Amino acid sequence: MAGYYIAQIDIHDLDRYEDYKKLAGAAIAAHGGEYVVRGGEQTHLEGQAPRSRVVVLKFESVEAAKAWFISDDYAAAHKIRSEAATSDSFIIEGD
């Protein structure tokens, strides 16, 4: 089954976040991931609203998503994102 990485993000340094996106995209592609959702308009329906930006990535499996997240390929991008934004993220198994 596929593994989906889901992040809810509030960006507080747009310039640094642009640097993040460049590095992250290359790391995601190198690990066979693809963007399913990258921002976009949100319609809040119930419960607590998500952060201002939601990103969903699809990988071949949960294991592949975990391997990408802890990879050396993604490490520099993750550091930048941690400095430029506040986020909540998780990986979930799906079709």
Image: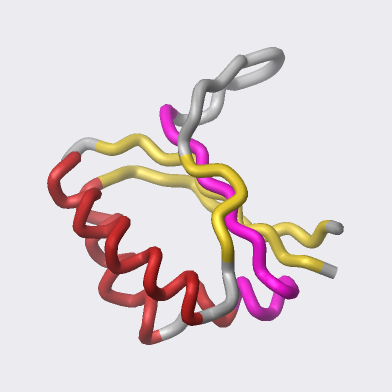
Q: Is residue 18 left or right of residue 5?
A: left
Q: Position of residue 14 (x, y in %)?
A: 19, 40
Find out whether residue 64 is within the magenta segment.
Answer: yes
Q: Classify residue 32 by image quadrant.
A: bottom right
Q: Classify residue 77 by image quadrant.
A: bottom left
Q: How many marks?
A: 0
Image quadrant holding the C terminus, namely bottom right
Q: Is residue 93 left or right of residue 9?
A: right
Q: Is residue 17 left or right of residue 9?
A: left
- Image height check: is 59 above or below 83? below
Residue at 49% of width from left, 43% of height from top?
38
Q: Position of residue 63 (x, y in %)?
A: 69, 79
- Image height check: is 32 above or below 39? below
Comparing 15 with 79, the one in front is: 15
Magenta part of the protein: which range?
Answer: 52-66
Q: Is residue 73 left or right of residue 22?
A: right
Residue at 37% of width from left, 86% of height from top?
72
Residue at 36% of width from left, 65% of height from top?
24
Q: Residue furthest left?
A: 15
Q: Position of residue 40 (x, y in %)?
A: 49, 29
Comparing 70 with 16, the one in front is: 16
Image quadrant holding the N terminus, namely bottom right
Q: Classify residue 35 by image quadrant.
A: bottom right
Residue at 20% of width from left, 58% of height from top?
19
Q: Residue furthest bottom?
A: 72
Find out whether residue 8 is within the magenta segment.
Answer: no
Judging from the image, the colouring scheme is secondary structure
- Image height check: is 75 above or below 39? below
